[in-house]
Amino acid sequence: MKVDATKVASILREMADLLSIKGENPFRIRAYEKAARTLEHLPGDMEALYKQGKLKDISGLGKGMLEKIATILNTGRLPAYEELKKEFPEGTRELLFISEIGPKTVKLLYEEEGVKNIEDLETFAKSGKLRDLPGMGAKTEENILRGIKLYRTSKARILLGRAQPLVEEVIAELKNRASSWIEKISPAGSLRRGKETIGDIDILVSSRNSSPVMDGFAQLSFVKEILAKGETKSSILTTQGLQIDLRVVSPDSFGAALQYFTGSKSHNINLRERAIKRGLKINEYGVFTREGEKLAGKNEKEVYASLDLPFIPPELREDRGEIEAAEKGRIPCLLREKEIKGDLHMHTKMSDGVNTIEELIEKAKSKGYEYIAITDHSLSLKVARGLSIETLLAQIKEIKKINSHLEGFKVLAGSEVDIKKDGSLDYPDEILGKLDIVIAAIHTGFKQDKKTITARVVKAIQSPFVRIFAHPTGRLLGEREAYAVDLNKVLEVAKDRGIWLEINAQPQRLDLTDIWIMEAKKKGVKLAINTDAHNKEGLDFMSLGVATARRGWCQAPDVVNTLSLEEFIHKL
Ligand code: DGT
Ligand code: CA
Ligand code: CA
């Protein structure tokens, strides 16, 4: 059995949950959680790291945990896990995902009432017996039934690219309905952190009077169901089945609440530990001394400052070393969208796009760009109407003509050349030589094994004509896993050859991912953030690519399309 990091992480996560149901020592549970998180975020091949003896150098993995990981790698099993699983039936762990159900309740429900899974829980609650358990009541029973419903509808996360426009509309409508009561309003949660997918949308408002704001929220045109409505927190389910949580706080707590509800949870836990070490208390209302004196709360900057830290941008708050970096004054000045000067991957109506080159230029100029590359699909990619050699040559000519009329803006003649199954490129070299920029990408043979597909990519990016390797992992969120390609190897070759790796800004791709961006940066491989637009509006996806780059700790110099036209031309 092939065991990868995700698989080991899921075993450890499951163990953490089962141990919590069992009522084990919280420190032990935390150790499993931490190890699981570390493995989930591990760049590269865990097995290779293990074989090279490098796994032990990764922080977050203690000695005992390393032994367990070794056992899983060597035998494909972990006896402690199998023993633990015998104690609880398959579905009990899933009960933890229902809000208002904690590990103690799960234990009680299973041992005393024989509730083994979500279906059992639903039956039990509907029979009206749940309310009689300690700490429960009719209200909790109702909430739990609603929680079950919600859990079932919201198992799927939605794309950042879908959530972002929605939250903008919600904020605009809410401002309309309760403008005089809203002092400040901001998205929080994973959306503010720019995560690629969003579980639910969190919005925070500061106001001196929450009732009119909550009323306005409950009346939004998006509301399908009001899940909860209170003074400080309300939740709705939108017509698209998405949950939105709104919290209203007083202005002097806005910063503390924004910090708290932006998360991530593990960033917050670290921050809280730091506060405790300093004899302070931090919560959604502020930072307090032991005596209860309030030190900060109005804005996030003062919240962090009260813990002797500079402001940490939301995209970095993932417990990936940002607090240590902040402590040392090493928080990077992250890339901003306005620093982007061009877009190097887009399609026209000649292949599978809808707009003309001129229309794309107009849109690019309106975004303040100085250059774009036109990169239609290549010869054999028939499904995407790949350009024949004649058509490509005609397009190159057309671009030359267009450029002769342009000033301070340049269109690069490019191609998104398919990497064929054997690693060869989809146009002959003499044609590739006529292009300003060549992007290589995989569009078929996704299921090749690691060795084959890695060799295929390495061969392709060794071509002297290739500048960019596009959507390097090939994953499609919610649809297709990454290919088996060994990206560490690809990064090595890219570094050697001076190839740029793409951060593809399509909402379903966001590929490279944040973790791999960090890795590319570490290895000194430059990145290009491209939209891969198939129509002119698609150029606006750049903001998603920038958010992902920021999550990968990118600064402007890490990204080639922040260069001005003049500087960029010299890099080709
Ligand atoms: P999501 O919605 O799954 O994409 O992820 P988030 O991060 O938006 O999570 P959510 O909506 O459950 O909660 C929003 C934020 O509230 C979260 O990032 C951190 C904070 N938060 C929630 N629960 C806890 C908690 O138990 N402890 C701490 N310290 N913070 C929490
Ligand atoms: Ca959320
Ligand atoms: Ca939430």
Image (spheres, rainbow, N blue to C red):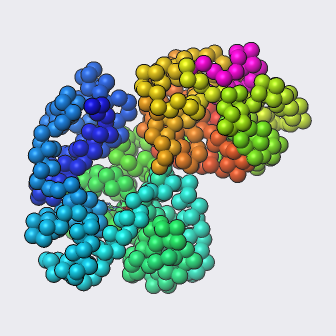
Residue shown at 31% from the left, 36% from the top: 5
Lateral position of residue 228 relative to residue 341, left or right: left
Where residue 484 sits, quadrant-wise, is top left
Q: In the rendered image, which quarter contains the C terminus?
A: top right
Q: In the rendered image, which quarter contains the N terminus?
A: top left
Q: Look at the image and say whether residue 196 sits in the magenta stretch.
A: no
Q: Nearer the viewer, residue 367 or 156?
A: 156
- Residue 550 percent across, percent down from the top left: 50, 44
Is residue 550 visible in the rendered structure shown here? no
Residue shown at 67% from the left, 37% from the top: 383
Q: Please state the quadrant of the image where ligand 1 appears.
A: bottom left
Q: Nearer the viewer, residue 66 or 390?
A: 390
Relative to 444, residue 164 above or below = below
Residue shown at 74% from the left, 25% from the top: 436
- Residue 89 percent across, percent down from the top left: 17, 56
Q: Which residues are magenta?
A: 423-440
- Residue 429 percent across, percent down from the top left: 70, 15
